[in-house]
Each structure stands twice: as structure tokens, then as C-alpha cells.
Image (cartoon, rainbow, N blue to C red):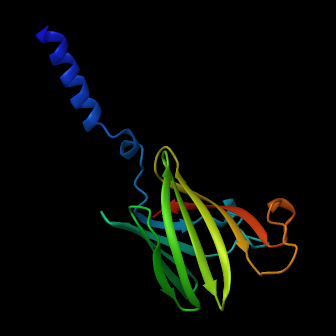
Amino acid sequence: MRFPALVLAVTALLFLNANPVRAQRPDFAGTWVMDRAQSASAGQAEAIGPVTLVIRVTPSELIVERTQSTNKRTIHYRADGGDTQSTLEMGSATGRLRWDGPRLITETVYDVQGIPINVKATHSLSSDGRELTVQSELFVVHGYQGQHDSAPNTNPNYSSGTDVYIRK
């Protein structure tokens, strides 16, 4: 009777110490430069650029610094998924993150002169870790009557796009 109990105890210990979700999380930290030829930014008729992302990861937060020309903005995301306030030159932003397997999803509400702009960005890495793909959905909330919230593909306040960055 001791052997089955030992096997059960060892199995339980291995199961409790294994963290398959964390093992699937890729390392997004580093400096990333937009590949304009492969990118189609949300809300833009053509790819914007040049854009550089610097992503820093600490045990308590993920920090994304985005630079486009001379415009720089830094958004902080709490590692536990809670809301984080960031102060920007033209307003503020509230961000939160979550994981969907190996994909990092950030949801950010920018307050630009009293108008909320909601951005959901799904970040994923190529298998070799050299290419970062960011799929973005952007929704501008104007407060107009009769918004088309239920049909994003026909809503003039909605836009989506995919940007590709190369690790520097």
C-alpha cells in the first residue's frame, strides 16, 4: 500500500509545481523596430513609421515605450492584470494585460482631450523570437447617438490593423 501512496504524492507534487501557463509565455522584452513593408496600422491609410518599441519586463509590471519620430509614450501594465494609470503628453491612459496562452493581450483606454480611445492589442512572437506581430483593434467612443457598437466592420469609429516588428 505504500507504493501507490508514494506515486500519488510524487505525482501531486510534480503537478502542483508545474506551471504550464508560465512555461508558454514568450519573452517580449527588448527593442523592436517596425517593418513598414509588412505593417498596416489600425486607424491609418498606410503604415506609419518609423516606430520603435522598447519593452521592459519586471516581476511586477510590463512597460511599453513607443517612439514614433519625436513622439514618445510609455504605458505601464501590472503583471497581475490590474489597471494601471499612465500620464501622457496629450492625456492619460489606463492599461491592463492578460495572457492567452503564448499571446500577450493589452487593453488600453487613452483619454485624449476627454475622448476615450479603446485599443486592444494582441502580441505574438515568431517561433524564432525575432519577429513580433501586434494585431490591434481601435475604437473611438464619441458618444454619438446610434453608434454601431455591435458591427465593428461597418462602424466608422472602429479600425483594425497588424504591425510587424523586428527584434533589434
Q: Nearer the viewer, residue 5 or 39?
A: 5
Q: Position of residue 145 (x, y in %)?
A: 86, 78
Q: Position of residue 91 (x, y in %)?
A: 57, 89
Determine whether, in the image, residue 127 is placed left or right of residue 115. left
Instruction: Identify the residue at the far left of this view.
Output: 2
Determine whether, in the image, residue 145 is placed left or right of residue 165. right
Q: Nearer the viewer, residue 71 or 147?
A: 147
Determine whether, in the image, residue 140 is placed left or right of residue 154. left
Q: Quadrant of residue 71?
A: bottom right
Q: Quadrant of residue 20?
A: top left
- The answer to whether residue 70 is above or below residue 126 is below
- The answer to whether residue 164 is above or below residue 88 is above
Quadrant location of the N terminus in the rendered image:
top left
- Name which residue lies at 33% across and 40% down: 19
Quadrant location of the C terminus in the rendered image:
bottom left
- The answer to whether residue 112 is above or below residue 77 is below
- Name which residue lies at 30% across and 63% down: 59
Q: Position of residue 131 (x, y in %)?
A: 53, 54
Q: Position of residue 64 (x, y in %)?
A: 46, 72
- Name which residue lies at 52% across and 60% down: 166
- Name which residue lies at 73% across and 76% down: 140
Q: Nearer the viewer, residue 14 or 134?
A: 14
